[in-house]
Amino acid sequence: MTNKLLEIVKTESTTQKVIAGETFRPKNPFTRFLETIGLKLRLILEETLLKSQINRFYLIFGGHIFFETLRTACQLDLFTLLHERKSLTREEIRKLLNLEDQPLRIILLGLVSIGLLKKRGDKYSNTLSSHILFNRHSKRNVLAYVELQHHAMYPALHHLLESVKENRNAGLDELEGKGQTIYERLEHNPSLEVIFQDAMHELSIQTNRLLVEAIDLSHTKHLIDVGGGDGTNIMEFARKWPHLKATVFDFPGACSIADENLETHGLSHRLNTIPGDCFKDEFPKHADSFLFSHFFTIWSPDKDKFLLKKAYHALPKGGRVIIFNMMQKDDETGPLSAAVGSPYFLSLATGEGMLYTSKEYETWMKEAGFSKVQRIKLPIDHGIIVGIK
Ligand SMILES: C[S@@+](CC[C@H](N)C(=O)[O-])C[C@H]1O[C@@H](n2cnc3c(N)ncnc32)[C@H](O)[C@@H]1O
């Protein structure tokens, strides 16, 4: 009887519970046959599912490897080269980039495997996504963002576990200088500040055209762009609305980059900067619109609510507050961009922000006193929430 029991337990796998001391009643052969078939089917199904998910596992497991493969190709300007030459053999690429064959072979294998290059016969060419995203001639390239990921996000994300356990931006320890946020530390790291502002500029020019298209500033006299960075936003607005005056309110380092840009683009007669800290310094009282673009994701809900109240008090009746950034779905199931973006705010930027839902912003605006709160959906993962005083 014991041998029989062991045999059945073995056949039915470890998932079958054998409770010590339970009276054993032998099953009839037909029941046993059905159970064995059921188990086999389940194992086949599990194997099939696992096989279909294995690529997803490799993408997760090798995320850092694939990213650094991509970054290496970007630094070598391989995607631009392939855009200019249409397609090249490995030997042609090797000669043009002055590389040894084996390292190049490794990089090409990685790029083809993850779908960033196509290989037809012995010729390599760009896929549509690499043509758009990583070729220097493309207006929608994200090359500066790749550099920011490499220089700032990767070292910082090594500290994610610490950040989660201690609820702080432990990744900031990677940066020299004083201050509890990446923005204050950037003031002490001029080369990283340039990489950071370049990436923000890139993000701004690509996403902010949607903001510029969606927001009507025909009746706005003066807009304050809190955390306006290098001035990309206000310059875009000023080009569309020739009557508009606007100001970047940001830290001194960012303001001096913005001042230079405003001067270069001949817009400094209408646009200017006010260096300041939005939590410590007064908001200007002469504006009728406040914009928070890619800004509320940085801070805790309490700080965002504080800033909304502060803007409310600085605005005249009828004045407007505009929030623009990536938003999480109201049911908190994604999108991927929100899941990718949020750990950065925890482990590096401030240790307190994330990508909130549109619903949260709407609630906070109403709590601050704004009425006619409106949600504007955009074709990408960004959203706009507008409130009127
Ligand atoms: C993520 S960037 C957003 C730049 C720009 N608004 C955009 O849409 O691309 C955040 C900006 O907020 C600024 N910033 C951070 N903390 C600030 C503070 N306490 N007061 C004012 N600006 C701040 C940073 O210097 C940086 O330029």
Image (cartoon, helix red, strand yellow):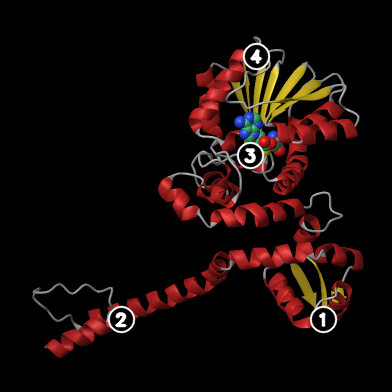
Q: Quadrant of residue 326?
A: top right
Identify the image quadrant of the C terminus.
top right
**Could you say which is closer to the camera, residue 86 or residue 205?**
205
SS at mark 2? helix
Tag 4: amino acid? Leu
Q: Is residue 29 visible to us here?
A: yes
Picture coordinates of residue 229, whole percent (x, y) = 72, 35
Residue 290 occupies which quadrant of the picture? top right
Q: Amino acid at mark 3?
A: Tyr
First of labels 1, 3 by sequence position? 1
For label 4, count other residues whose C-alpha is less than 10 Å away and answer few (under 14), some (14-19) or many (20+).
Answer: many
Q: What is the secondary structure assignment of the residue under circle 4?
A: loop
Q: Can you tell me which quadrant of the image ligand 1 is in?
A: top right
Q: Residues within 10 Å of mark 2 (few under 14, many from 20)?
A: some
The residue that disc 2 covers is 36
Question: Label 4 belongs to which residue?
Answer: 315
Residue under the point 68% across and 43% down: 380
**Label 3 residue near ligand 1, CB within 8 Å:** yes
Q: Which residue is mark 3?
A: 183
Residue 294: image x %, image y %? 65, 37
Task: Locate residue 167 relative to residue 205 in the image: left or right.
Answer: left
* Beta carbon of the mark 4 residue lies under 8 A of ligand 1: no
Q: Residue at x 41, y 50 (%)?
A: 165
Q: Nearer the viewer, mark 2 or mark 3?
A: 3
- Residue 376 relative to residue 48: left or right: right
Q: Amino acid at mark 2?
A: Thr
- Tag 1: amino acid: Asp
